[in-house]
Structure formats: structure tokens, C-alpha cells
Image (cartoon, rainbow, N blue to C red):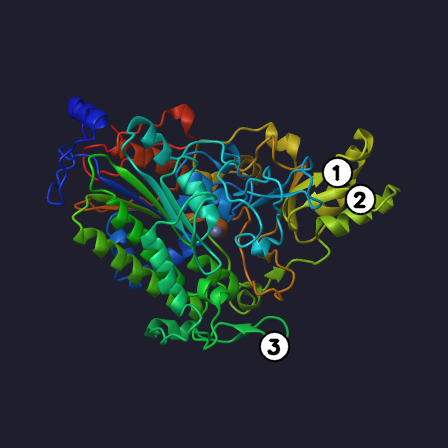
Amino acid sequence: MQKSNIVTALAALITFSGTANAEDNNSAERANPKLVVAISVDQFSADLFAEYRSSFTGGLKRLANGVVFPSGYQSHAATETCPGHSTIMTGVHSGRAGIIANNWIDQSIEREDKTVYCAEDERIAGTSFGDITAATQGDFVASAWHLLVPTLGERLKKISPQSRNVAVAGKDRAALMMGGHDIDEIYWWKGNGFSTLQGRKIMPAVARLNETIGAKIDKARPAFDIPARCSAHSAKIMHGEGKSVGDYAFQRPDGAASIYRGSPDFDRSIIAAATTVINEMKLGQGEATDVISVGLSATDYIGHAFGTEGLEMCIQMGELDRSLGEFFDILDGQNIDYVVMLTADHGGLDLPERMSQQGVPTAQRIDPDLNAKVIGKKVAAGLNIPGDKPVLYADGPFGDYYVSLDLSEEQREQVKDSAIALIAAHAQVEMVLDRDDIASIEVPRGSPDEWTLAERARASFNPDRSGDFIVLLKKGITPIATTQRGYVSTHGSPWDYDRRVPILFWRSGIQHFEQPLSVMTVDIAPTLGALIGVEITADQTDGQCLDIDGGPANSCE
Ligand code: ZN
């Protein structure tokens, strides 16, 4: 929309009564889209997008023919699911959003392990954190209360009360971080079906969908097509005793729910739930613009269980492309004027056992003794600190480490210095950053590909929640010591294989262009906001509006 058109724009902003239709392709004249479809494909790295791009024929091909930013950045160091999803619809870095990691330590809470899950409300009595791998199934109350900033959908509802803000995802944290607090309907997968916030009812159509899925979830399924391009990816890679990945095509006659989550069928279910909610609520068909956030989680479960470069991911990329195409075809069929944005919460890295065969001889699993428990015991012994209470807390071998608040100030300083010295000397550790050093710098506004490691850590730092120091591992170190629990590879590092994600926009009639220079996921909310009349001011975002009009008009004005 052009500056000269500001009166029309204002009218549209106030009344939301534009008369958009699919044939009206003149961007200067165009009304606001009626539906924003914001999709996050969990663990869909820029590398996966590049690797499979030429093979796409469905929904991802359509997006690749829209506006393409192949070098999007989840700019922060803590490249995990919750921080990643917290940047996409808020326009701020994860630290400012309050989401420093999937889990962090809060020594003020009663629980013995002091661990808090990003998408829970631990203030509600009787809940427990449980095991991280069971985080989405455990005994806790899901909530967006840790998220400190509003999402795009919430901002829209403030100025346009008829607008609906909806989220559907495979993971609770994806739905909650993209949807936010003020949400009309929200669903995520839990156990054997879609669940919602405590105290809310599941709409009947979603309950019926749950029955349909439940009836087939543990049954054998027909084989997926194995495209010719996948044959080169099909090779058995051993990891641990008698365990392998690389040649599995998702056909297990006794497939249980956990396997279902790690198969292309899971994304189909999430898209079916999103479609059901769109149909039931008639999203995009009212006077006002609606927002739906969709979190497709299968790519992440498949990446963790099988790595990123095997037959399994090759099949998944084709199926994801196909199911997105089916989703967009349904939206086309309803004559909704919708805009799609697709990105990812983080990238990912293949398992070290395959990487070491494929050009990265230095790829390794982490030393099992590199963690807060072992290091803490060594430090306490060295300093003659008595007792069995831990002196160090951390959720995992990298990221935020916390020194016990039960110690004296003097002891805390000694523990911190001694632990940092021990960890920094480890061959797998790139750098240990002291919280004071991180807090003293500013998050840069410029190109995220040029940021220092400390600047990346600053973007996921929050003074009230972050640790006393932050551990960053060397490139190619997989922070999973043993594959016994089923996860073979992961993400979470400050390196670009975990930070770089595609950012794609599509709307009917959009002029294709590709901009290879780096942009950030914090640019997404201001960019989409400008299309729907939600102004996100410079002080409210760490990003900036991207002009996605490929011609002389400017979608940001
Ligand atoms: Zn994720």
C-alpha cells in the first residue's frame, strides 16, 4: 500500500471492512488479508529447505514462488523450541520475551530439581515438572504466563475486538508461544489427541477428529512413497548397541502414539485440526482479520529420532510439502483472502555417527561427565563445601548454569569461578560466558550472521531468569551423550546450522522475489502487522517490517 493511500489504509484499519477478493491483485489497491496463517515447521532448517527445494511440488513450492528469505535467523544462542516460537509472533528476541530456554532453573520454587518448563504455570499447586522428554505429557498446567510480551494476534484483538486469535500445534509450547495469552481457541497434541487449556472445552468437531485419529493411531499404515531422490539417503547408520537409523520408512505394524508423533502422519493430523478449527469458526470469512498460528511438529520429532540426512527426513520433506499443498487447496476452496508465513523455531544438525562418515570427522557426542551434577560435585569437593545439596544447577549440559543460592556470597563466587575454569578447559567447550559480561552488552540490530557468540547469547538472555554463566559447546558437538532414550540428534547451539531458518511469505497474486541477505524471525510480526493494520512500533520490536511487495509499492507503509 502506498503512502498516498493512507486514508484508505486508515479506513481499513478502523473498520476492517475491506472488500478483498482473490482476483484483486493490485497491491496498491488491496484490502487487508482476512486471515493470517503463520506456520512454524519445527526444526525446518534453512539447510533442509535448500536441500529439498528443487523437489517440492506442493505447498512448499507455492511458498518458494512467493517472497523468499532463505537466510532467516533465529538470532539467539538458545536455539530451542520454546525460545524459537517466542520470537515468531512477538517481534522480540527470546530473552526479552522471557523465554530463555525450553526449561530453566528457578531456585525459589518448592520442587526439588528447581526446573521450570517454559509453557507451564508452576504456581499452581500440585503440579510437577517430571521428565523433560515427557514434558508435553507430564503433570503440569500448560500456560503462556512466562511469555512477557503480546503476540501479533493479541495486538490485533486489542484494536479489532471481532478478530479471532487461534493456535493449533503438535506441541503445547509451540501453540502457546505463537498464540499468547488472549486466545480464542488453542489446541495441541497430548497423549492420543488434541487438548486445550485447563478449564476450557474442546469444540465438538475437534473431539470428533480426536476419535477419528484415535481409531487409527496404533494401526499399521500403508507404506509411504519413497521418491527416487531418497534412495541416496537410505543407508543404515549404527548408533549404540544394535540401534540404527537411516533406512526406516515409518512402517511399524505395532506403531504406538510416540511413533505416530515421529511420522509424517502427525503433521497431517495437526493440519486436519487447523482446518477443522478454521471451518468451525469460519476464520477469514468475517468482517475482521483473523490470525491462526500453526505449529507442525513432525519434522522435529523425526530429526531427533532419525537425524536430518537419512531416508526418514527425505520422506518427511516430501510428505510435508504434500500436506501443506492440501491445506492451501482447502483454503483456496473457501475463497478466503489469506496470507501465509512459514518459518521454523530453529534448525538442526544430523547425528554425529552419520556426520563422521559424511565429511565431518570431528563430529562427536558430548562427554557424559560434562554436566552440572558431575562438575558441581568436583567443585564442591575442591572447595571443601560439605553436604549433599547441589552447588550447581542446569537443565542439560549446555546453556544456563546456576550457582546454588543456599551458599554464602563468598562460596557462590568461588563455586562460579571454579566451575567456569573447569568447564572452559574442556575440549568440547567453545566458550563460557559470565552473566555480567552478557548483561553489559546490547543486542545488535544489524545482520545476525555477523554477531559474536556473546551477542547471540545476549539475545536469549533475561536478567530475571538466566543463569550465572552460560556454556556454549564447540561446533559439531551433539549434546546427547547416549542414544538409549531414542533421541539421536538435536539442536540448541549458537551455530548457524541451528539458527538459520527459511522465512517465506505467500498471498494470492504476490510478486515473487528472493532476498538472500539475512533477516530475522523478529521481523515477522512487524511485517505481518503492517499487512493487517497492526502497527508495531520500533520500541516494541527487536526487528523491522520487511517490505514484501516486490515492486515500487511498500507493504510497510
Ligand atoms: Zn523445536
Q: Which residue is mark 3?
A: 242
Horizontal relation, residue 458 to residue 300: left or right: right
Pick the front one: 118 or 321: 118
Q: Quadrant of the N terminus?
A: top left
Q: Which mark identifies residue 389?
A: 2
Pick whichever of labels 2 and 3 is earlier in the sequence: 3
115, above or below 552, in the image: below
Q: Amino acid at mark 2?
A: Lys
Pick whichever of labels 2 and 1 is earlier in the sequence: 2
Q: Nearer the viewer, mark 2 or mark 3?
A: 2
Is the residue marked by circle 1 packed among few (<14), some (14-19), or many (20+) residues within 10 Å?
Answer: some
Label 2–label 1 contact, CB within 8 A: yes
The location of residue 208, given as percent across then percent down, is 34, 58
394, above or below 18, in the image: below
The location of residue 469, given as percent across then percent down, is 67, 38
Label 1–label 3 contact, CB within 8 A: no
Residue at image point 86% right, 41% down: 383
Horizontal relation, residue 495 to residue 9: left or right: right
Residue at image point 46% right, 43% down: 199
Give the CA separation, mark 1 to mark 3: 40 Å
Q: Which residue is mark 1?
A: 404
